């Protein structure tokens, strides 16, 4: 599946140190001090040989994974996922971006593409079926939704338990994402069971109406947010990251936006004083005209003024309706509002959004790669911790290779051939005494790159 492949390009920091027929790798650790070698930029370059065919534009790489956890999943009691996690924790993205690491990551992501596809399918089923069920309360849709949501919910609990067993301290972002996912599944399950529960209740209470009205709204929003979170690892992940970056930038200018919104909301509310809908007066009478408005109704009038002003800040001014009041102060207020809130403030937000998009385009590949490596670490942890127990040995066959418990111990192919038409090929060859003429430009089955090299 090409949806989660990664760019195996040539970072300048990495490639300038790679010799064309690089020397044989030295002994990594002295015998008296055994242990896993430290994965550094120099180490990766020494374990990589490269060649470029100037006639065809084909790039060829040969890697030496011997003596590392990348060869068979574990070396000197250190797993490959631990090595990757150490690189991420130390923020050594320049090391991860070397062809030596990217070749391993790319092959493993392709092998577990089905695992990610299940994530996407489950998130899509929850989002689409939930949206349909909100409108058409069909029993079959409810059963399908419950089955998928419960499976996802139990797998999420299983994932948290696995992290606890491993004993590694996870970052705050992991717990936030787990909390959001648990909340999404819980609200969806509550909404699906609420209709069945209240079907046995004949009383039409205000609380019952509120629950049946509020739960589908929150459940739909949570399912939408969960779908965006899952799609971060897809080819559309850069757009999700752009949305995330723009939201962060907007939160930084809330200190300007909120006072501006409140100021003009109260100004319009007091000046217009209920003469135009929805600008209701704070001192309005109730329908019977004998009782003053309650505090709740006054608060609602203020809230409506804020909502109306926020829509005006987006350009929906409705100036004709406001100017019908034929008051000097209203006309002057509208003019000041248009200059500050619409022209100046909106241009400020647009300029920030454009700058964020430009910056993200330069850093998107690195951020998406980091997300994919984190996903790969979780898959490797799952297979290492529960593969032999969860997956029966009788399933290990070529027909069921997707469910092979040896995923984390499978050795990567050490030859990568990048063709000029943006396809890549894997094969195996001895690292020592490489003869580039013996490595053809095209062999076997090719796959398309998801990211330009």
Image (tube, grey):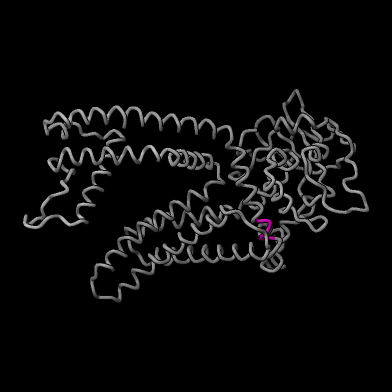
Q: Position of residue 33 (x, y in %)?
A: 90, 53
Q: Quadrant of residue 41?
A: top right
Which of 344/5 is in front?
A: 344
Q: What range of the chain is rendered magenta?
A: 379-383
The residue that appears at 20% across and 56% down in the rendered structure is 295
Q: Position of residue 30 (x, y in %)?
A: 92, 49
Which of 12/3 is in front?
A: 12
Q: Can you see residue 68? A: yes
Which of 82/333 is in front?
A: 333
The residue that appears at 31% across and 39% down in the rendered structure is 261
Q: Quadrant of residue 399?
A: bottom right
Asked if residue 265 is among those painted magenta in the image, a careful observer would answer: no
Which of 366/396 is in front?
A: 366
Q: Position of residue 85 (x, y in %)?
A: 69, 51
63 relative to 223 in the view: left or right: right
Q: In this picture, is 404 found above or below 450?
A: below
Q: Main secondary structure of the magenta part?
A: helix
Q: Quadrant of the C terminus?
A: top right
Q: In this picture, is 174 found above or below 392?
A: above
Q: In this picture, is 201 found above or below 273?
A: below
208 relative to 85 in the view: left or right: left
Asked if residue 381 is among those painted magenta in the image, a careful observer would answer: yes
Q: How many callouts does the rendering have?
A: 0
Q: Can you see residue 1? A: no
Q: Position of residue 65 (x, y in %)?
A: 81, 46
């Amino acid at each position: 599946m090409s949806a989660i492949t990664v760019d195996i390009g040539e970072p300048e920091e990495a490639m300038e140190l790679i010799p064309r027929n690089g020397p044989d790798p030295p002994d990594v650790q002295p015998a008296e001090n055994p242990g896993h070698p430290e994965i550094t930029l120099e180490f990766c370059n020494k374990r990589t040989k490269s060649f470029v065919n100037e006639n065809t534009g084909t790039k060829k790489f040969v890697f030496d994974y011997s003596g590392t956890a990348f060869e068979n999943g574990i070396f000197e009691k250190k797993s490959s996922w631990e090595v990757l996690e150490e690189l991420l924790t130390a923020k050594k993205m320049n090391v991860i971006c070397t062809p030596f690491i990217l070749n391993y990551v790319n092959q493993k992501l392709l092998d577990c593409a089905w695992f990610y596809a299940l994530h996407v399918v489950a998130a899509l089923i929850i989002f689409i079926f939930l949206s349909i069920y909100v409108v058409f309360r069909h029993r079959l849709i409810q059963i399908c939704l419950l089955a998928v949501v419960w499976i996802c919910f139990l797998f999420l609990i299983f994932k948290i338990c696995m992290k606890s067993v491993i004993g590694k301290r996870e970052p705050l972002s992991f717990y936030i994402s787990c909390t959001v996912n648990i909340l999404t599944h819980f609200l969806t399950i509550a909404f699906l069971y609420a209709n069945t529960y209240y079907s046995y209740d004949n009383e039409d209470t205000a609380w019952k109406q509120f629950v049946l009205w509020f739960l589908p709204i929150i459940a739909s929003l949570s399912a939408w947010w969960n779908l965006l979170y899952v799609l971060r690892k897809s080819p559309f992940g850069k757009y999700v990251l752009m949305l995330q970056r723009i939201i962060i930038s907007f939160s930084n200018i809330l200190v300007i936006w909120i006072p501006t919104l409140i100021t003009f909301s109260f100004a319009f509310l007091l000046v217009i004083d209920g003469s135009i809908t929805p600008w209701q007066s704070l001192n309005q009478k109730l329908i019977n005209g004998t009782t003053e408005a309650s505090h709740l109704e006054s608060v609602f009038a203020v809230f409506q003024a804020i909502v109306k002003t926020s829509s005006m800040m987006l350009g929906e001014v409705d100036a004709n309706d406001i100017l019908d009041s034929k008051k000097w102060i209203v006309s002057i207020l509208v003019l000041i509002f248009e200059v500050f809130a619409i022209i100046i403030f909106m241009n400020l937000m647009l300029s920030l959004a454009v700058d964020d998009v430009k910056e993200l385009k330069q850093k998107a590949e690195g951020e998406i790669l980091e997300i994919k490596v984190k996903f790969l670490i979780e898959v490797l942890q799952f297979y290492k911790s529960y593969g032999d127990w969860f997956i029966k040995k009788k399933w290990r066959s070529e027909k069921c290779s997707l469910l092979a418990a040896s995923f984390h111990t499978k050795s990567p192919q050490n030859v990568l051939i990048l063709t000029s038409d943006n396809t890549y090929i894997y094969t195996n060859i001895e690292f020592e005494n490489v003869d580039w003429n013996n490595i053809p430009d095209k062999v076997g089955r090719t796959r398309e790159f998801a990211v330009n090299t």
